Image (cartoon, grey):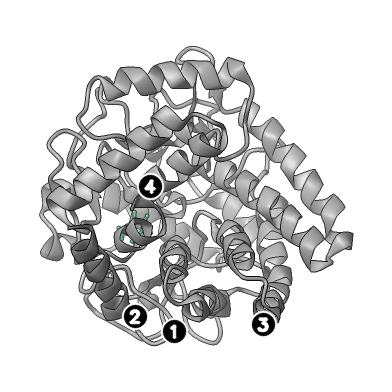
Amino acid sequence: MGADLDALAHSILRDNDQGGYTIPTKGLYPYQWNWDSVFVAMGFATFDLDRAWQEIENLFQGQWDDGMVPHILFRKNDPSYFPGPDIWGTKSEPFPTSGHSQPPVAATAMRDLFEQSRAPENAERAKALFPKVMAWHRWWATYRDPKGHGSVAIVHPWESGRDNLPDWDEPLSNVDTTNVPDYVRKDTSHVAPEMRPLKQDYDRYMAILTVGKACGWDPKETVEKTPFLVADPAITMILLRANRDLLVLAEKLGYLDAMPEIQGWIERLEKGLESLWNPKIQAYVTRNLRTDVLGTGVSSASFLASYAGITDPKVIEPLKAHFDRIAGKVNYMLPSYDPDHPGFEHMRYWRGPVWAVVNYMASRGMREAGDHLRSEKIRKDTVRLIQQSGFAEYFSPVDGAGAGGNSFSWTAAVWLAWAT
Ligand code: 9WN
């Protein structure tokens, strides 16, 4: 069984490989996505380290002059996805891209690849990538903390990678959709609509995109004008973790001058996380930076606290209690949203389903923090899900059914890199 699944995972990565970059799955997502590629690199690293480096290097081919690494790289036009390059309308070189970013996992993967083999050619590749990653992290630090809280703000739910999380409902409810031109979705022609965001969500996604486009996706102007500006605990934690890994790389690669700047980012993000702690529910939540309203639910983001290097028992203990409560409610951890919350839907995308990549990060952090029991619970549940339902995009935490796209790259990658 394990060997069969390993072989299948390899073939999924090879099949979705477009020659140097990998698409998440055919049909539904025919382009290169940012955090997908980074997890894919972790999978490739288990059998082809050169190809793993190449995946990350090619992601940075899409980097903008201001340092931003876009969430989608449109290397060639493919009408099976909406919204494509014409709708985004960016003028980026050498190929069109989307206009905002996605969770910055790259530095963490880079450190893993570097530590896997310090052969001179790997050190050279890490050295060449380092300034690009610095520029990306500097972009987050410069533009995405407009209120000075220290947390990371996103300008579109797509930027979070957790597109229809119930926490976005409140900020999205303030988005005016009256001027959204007609459009035709493609996602619901590939996947059952009940597993995808609602039309109302898509209308709002398009309205926000239209504002960003009118700003030319200038980072400062977009933050000023976007109708959706929300601090995201997951990106804040992922960037915090990535900065800790970048700091280690700076030292090992001889970029000593970069260290104080990275250290400053780490301290700011640690402080920023405090502003996302909701004392009422004892968990990390989103903060709408337009209204100052805090999210009301425990999403899987909270369980990335150890991954982010947070050790304070005042935070970790209540989160463990949430974990144990939730584990008593579902058959497979981690649901993307609290099953006790009215916003929970077990098959609808980021409103409940389990995502292997989030499981990987959460479990890794818990293991590093010495919480082997919970870390292993997540890993074993992920193995059971994949054994039962294959390499699906996401899974029901209730019955383990696979949902979304099939033959999914990051699920295969995470299987190879961590689950088995
Ligand atoms: C929009 C590719 C991406 C993931 C995201 C996931 C989904 C896209 C979509 O697919 O988002 O970016 O069109 O639904 O939410 O996390 O990177 O797998």
Three-letter amino acid code at the position of disc 1? Gly
Q: Disc 4 to disc 3, how far (Cα)?
A: 36 Å
- Name the element at disc 2: loop
- Looking at the rendered structure, which numbered label has been put on residue 162? 4
Q: Do the residues labelled 3 and 1 touch (CB within 8 Å)?
A: no
- Depth check, mark 2 against mark 4: the one in front is 2
Mark 3 or mark 2, whichever is nearer to me: 3
Q: Quadrant of residue 346?
A: top left
Number of numbered discs: 4
Residue assigned mark 3: 121
Mark 1 touches mark 2? (CB < 8 Å): yes
The earlier-in-sequence mark between 4 and 3 is 3
Residue closest to the eye, 336 or 176: 336
Mark 2: amino acid:
Asp
Which numbered tag is attached to residue 317?
Answer: none
Characterize the local packing of mark 1: few (<14), some (14-19) or many (20 or more) Cα atoms within 10 angstroms: some
Rendered residue at 45%/15% (across/down): 281
Instruction: State ligand 1's quadrant.
Output: bottom left
> Around disc 3, counting alpha carbons within 10 Å, would you say few (fewer than 14), some (14 to 19), or many (20 or more)?
few
Real-space CA distance between mark 2 and mark 4, rounded to the nearest whole angstrom: 24 Å
Cα distance between the residues tagged 3 and 2: 23 Å
Q: Distance between the residues labelled 3 and 1?
A: 18 Å
Quarter residue 136 falls in: bottom right
Q: Do the residues labelled 2 and 4 touch (CB within 8 Å)?
A: no
Residue at left offset 46%, top offset 45%? 361
Q: Which of 24 and 250 is in front in this view?
A: 250
Residue 180 rendering spot, x and y as whole percentages: 31, 58
Which residue is drawn at the image coordinates 49% and 57% (left, top)?
A: 102
Residue holding disc 1? 20
Label 3: state its secondary structure: helix
- Between marks 1 and 2, how big is the CA–CA gap? 7 Å
